[in-house]
């Protein structure tokens, strides 16, 4: 890849099948960016361990499934580097070294950390690794000296910490790390089927690998405009839980048609859901075709990772040579 290319890095934790919220929130951005930048995308399996250390049995299978979701969605290993965090030991070494210059107070006041410590009660998150989550993430990012990090809104505090750590390193050891910028998607929100945030743990998600048989009842049960009780009541697309999906998947013309039909009560929610189901099936079609190829070649995912790991390792090692020299080790 030529030097003039901008570099992009991002990762996801292997916590289970991706849903369309992940697709429109982050993955679509990853796929677009592979066309223009030198992109490094990885499975953050060590990050999964920071909270799931007591029940690690699914991390391995979820990692392979995650890569399968990515490839099915359109990440192309010829255009980007796809790798596994735990295979690149430099992520651990850089985490250790960045830990030397990261004040504990920065980690303790991280809003995501405080929130999760309060809200999550089924796991003990008093471990050192969980507090250090953002340091590991800073290492993931800075190793590849990127310009951009495409993430969801919820990751912004972590990315800010990455920049602060980079700044502190540069201050102590001379300018070296860039301060990478977030790349957010501008897509409309993708709520869950029940109006809450789409999340596998709420059971309100449509997965990228759901079959039509799985999807149909989900859509039938989906919330729409809760003030519209009968078809004869005029609806309001702006307070409807289904309309945002049309904004993601239907063309402008169809959206105008739906808005008109809904507000004049000529289009009922059942028909509107049918339109959505058609769009969703059409959207999923190419993903299913690519997934079928992956399913019939069980070694493919491992080959992609092997090749990606080799490329990522080489890049990460060259960064580490410079970091070690600057830090005197
Ligand atoms: N924390 C990110 C998430 O939960 C995953 C992640 C780990 C990541 N390392 C990263 C994202 C580096 C971007 C860059 O979504």
Image (tube, rainbow, N blue to C red):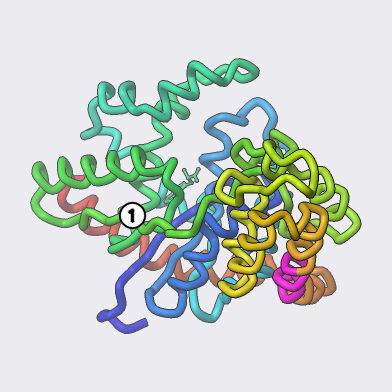
Residue at point 58%, 43% (across, down): 239
Q: Is mark 1 within 8 Å of ligand 1?
A: no
Q: Nearer the viewer, residue 77 or 148?
A: 148
Quarter that holds the C terminus? top left
Most prominent secondary structure in the magenta stretch?
helix
Q: Position of residue 226 (x, y in %)?
A: 69, 37
Within-10-Å neighbours for mark 1: few <14, some 14–19, many 20+? some
Evaluate whether residue 299 shows in this view. Answer: no
What range of the chain is rendered magenta?
279-287
Q: Is residue 90 magenta?
A: no
Quarter that holds the N terminus? bottom left
Residue bearing the label numbered 1: 182
Residue 313 vertical position relative to residue 3 in the rendered view, above or below:
above
Q: Nearer the viewer, residue 31 or 219?
A: 219
In the visual, does 38 lie left or right of 67?
left
In the visual, does 160 lie left or right of 128?
left
In the visual, does 238 lie left or right of 71?
left
Q: Position of residue 141 (x, y in %)?
A: 36, 53
Q: Position of residue 37 (x, y in %)?
A: 37, 75
């Amino acid at each position: 890849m030529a030097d003039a290319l901008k570099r992009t890095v991002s990762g996801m934790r292997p916590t289970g099948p991706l849903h369309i919220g992940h697709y429109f929130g982050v993955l679509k951005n990853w796929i677009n960016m592979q066309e223009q930048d030198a992109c490094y995308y990885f499975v953050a399996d060590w990050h999964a361990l920071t909270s799931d250390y007591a029940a690690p049995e699914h991390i391995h299978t979820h990692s392979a499934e995650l890569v399968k979701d990515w490839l099915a969605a359109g990440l192309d290993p010829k255009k980007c580097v796809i790798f596994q965090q735990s295979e690149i030991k430099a992520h651990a070494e850089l985490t250790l070294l960045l830990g030397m210059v990261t004040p504990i107070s920065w980690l303790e006041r991280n809003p995501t950390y405080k929130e999760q410590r309060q809200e999550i009660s089924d796991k003990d998150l008093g471990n050192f690794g969980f507090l250090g989550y953002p340091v590991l993430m800073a290492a993931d990012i800075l190793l590849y000296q990127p310009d951009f990090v495409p993430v969801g809104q919820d990751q912004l505090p972590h990315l800010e910490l990455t920049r602060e750590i980079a700044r502190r390193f540069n201050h102590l050891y001379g300018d070296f790390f860039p301060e990478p910028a977030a790349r957010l998607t501008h897509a409309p929100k993708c709520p869950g089927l029940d109006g809450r945030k789409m999340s596998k743990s709420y059971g309100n998600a449509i997965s990228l690998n759901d079959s039509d048989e799985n999807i149909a009842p989900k859509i039938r049960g989906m919330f729409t405009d809760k003030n519209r009780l009968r078809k004869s009541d005029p609806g309001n697309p702006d307070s409807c839980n289904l309309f945002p999906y049309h904004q993601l998947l239907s063309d402008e013309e169809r959206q105008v048609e739906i808005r008109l039909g809904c507000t004049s009560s000529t289009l009922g929610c059942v028909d509107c859901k049918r339109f959505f189901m058609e769009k969703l099936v059409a959207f999923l079609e190419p993903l299913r075709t690519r997934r079928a190829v992956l399913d019939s070649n069980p070694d493919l995912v491992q080959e992609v990772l092997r090749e990606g790991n080799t490329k990522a390792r080489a890049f990460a090692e060259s960064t580490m040579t410079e970091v070690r020299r600057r830090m005197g080790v």
